[in-house]
Amino acid sequence: MIKIYRNKLLIIIALISVFAVHTQAQISANADAVLSTEYSGGMAQDPIFIFCGSKGETNAGLQASTNMGGTISYEWQKYDAGAGVFQFYLGQPNGGSSQSISLLESGGYRVVISNGTQTEMYTAWVFNNYHEVSAEITESNCDYFQLQGAFDPLLTYYDLSTNQPMNIDKNIQLQWKEGEANIASDISTKIYDPPTSDTRYSLQVTDRFGCTGEAEVTYTSIVTKASFSVSEEGGEAPLEIEFSNESENGKPGSYEWFFFKSLEEIKEEAEKSGGVADSIDFVAYNDELTWTFENSGTYMVKLVSKHISDLHTCTDTFYLEDYIVADTSFVKAPNFFTPNGDGANDEFIVKFWSVRNIKISIFNRWGKLVHLWKGTNVQGFENTVATVTESVWDGKIGGKMASPGVYYYVVEARGRDDKNRWAHGFVHLFRDK
């Protein structure tokens, strides 16, 4: 029974001894991360201290401490990988219970602590960990450009039993960014649909120790984006449209506007010949454009924008979302008017729409012509009524007031859709209304 207790006591004493060894501060560092070596051959492992920083910085430092009494000396040694041994680095013969060294280059360090009768020896590795990140554009064409990054993914120390290099994988996480937006997480990535303006991209890397690095690269745009808007989407023919060029990064003087034949004309050609030889009516080469659709119809327009660089000519095409519709023709006349000078309905106005030629004849009850107007190449109803006084009848005959009563009108027109339009009927002239 006593023997059993004695064995347990020995085990407890051994555990306390082990615990005391591990709780003594022997070699330490104020590092960003700490890990352990993986030497072979059953050797005791040493700490590895990681210090985050930038290229050229020596942030690494070590502190050695001891519980030995007396006059303490510290000798620091640095590992020489070429020779496979530790070489003298720094010595201090009269030190206290601890000593720190700083501004260390990356590598293995050993400290030998002695008071003349006892000696302690501790080893550690330190790394001034930075990311030498690079970013470049390796390919750029009209469809995409390629972002390519590079960095050093490893740290290397040496197995002290074999002097063989041992790599520490940093486990890099990377992110390509455009401004604050994340766009890709591969070291090499293609960006399709490139922007039309010069754009800066950054490659940000973070390792498992929390150390970061960044590189930037500017994409010089060689592409264009075609776009335009129109002042009107439809109306009476002749229909004048202003085309506002809203393209991005196009070369001035290189724009091409393609005006298609009307759908009606294309359909008619197809029915007659079994196909359409060319659906393009004409091409204009202007940066900005105002165009008049002379005839009724349903029209499509596209714009081709170009960006010309040393190696590429990139183009982009924009179509209208909806067709431009130049209205079909019609004529319509009222059945009365009141030329009494009150400003309301004082004139007999025939409404004509999208016509090319028109003839308006008005007769009295005995068949005598009292008013006649012929218009050719008519430029719209509102414009004509406002500028051509003969296009309306003011209720006068030879400058004198016509008698109230019933008159007869005949309207003959040729529309801009090549349709003959005709209207006739009676109109009442009232004076006292």
Image (cartoon, rainbow, N blue to C red):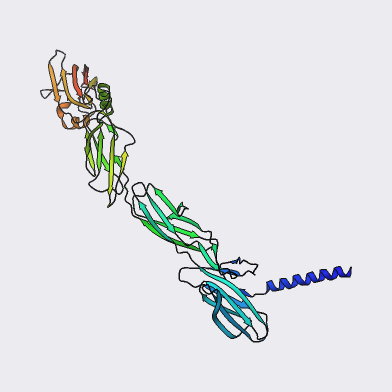
Left or right of 208 in this view: 262: left
Residue farthest along the right direction in this orientation: 1
Q: Position of residue 95 (x, y in %)?
A: 60, 84
Q: Quadrant of the C terminus?
A: top left
- Above or below residue 22? Residue 394 is above
Q: Is residue 190 left or right of residue 371?
A: right
Query: In this picture, is 298 found above or below 285?
Result: above
The answer to whether residue 388 is seen in the rendering is yes
Q: Residue at x 19, y 18 (%)?
A: 409
Where's residue 357, x and y in %? 17, 25
Question: Is 386 positioned to the left or the right of 99 in the image?
Answer: left
Q: Position of residue 308 (x, y in %)?
A: 27, 49
Please tell me which residue lies in front, 148 or 356: 148
Q: Quadrant of the N terminus?
A: bottom right
Q: Quadrant of residue 305?
A: top left
Q: Is residue 180 visible?
A: no
User: Picture coordinates of residue 236 (x, y %)?
Assistant: 25, 30
Residue displayed at 45% across by 71% down:
56
In the picture as drawn, the residue positioned furthest to the left comes out as 398
Q: Is residue 138 above or below residue 245?
A: below
Numbered disc total: 0
Q: Is residue 228 left or right of residue 414?
A: right
Residue appearing at x 14%, y 24% in the figure: 374
Q: Residue at x 53, y 76 (%)?
A: 102
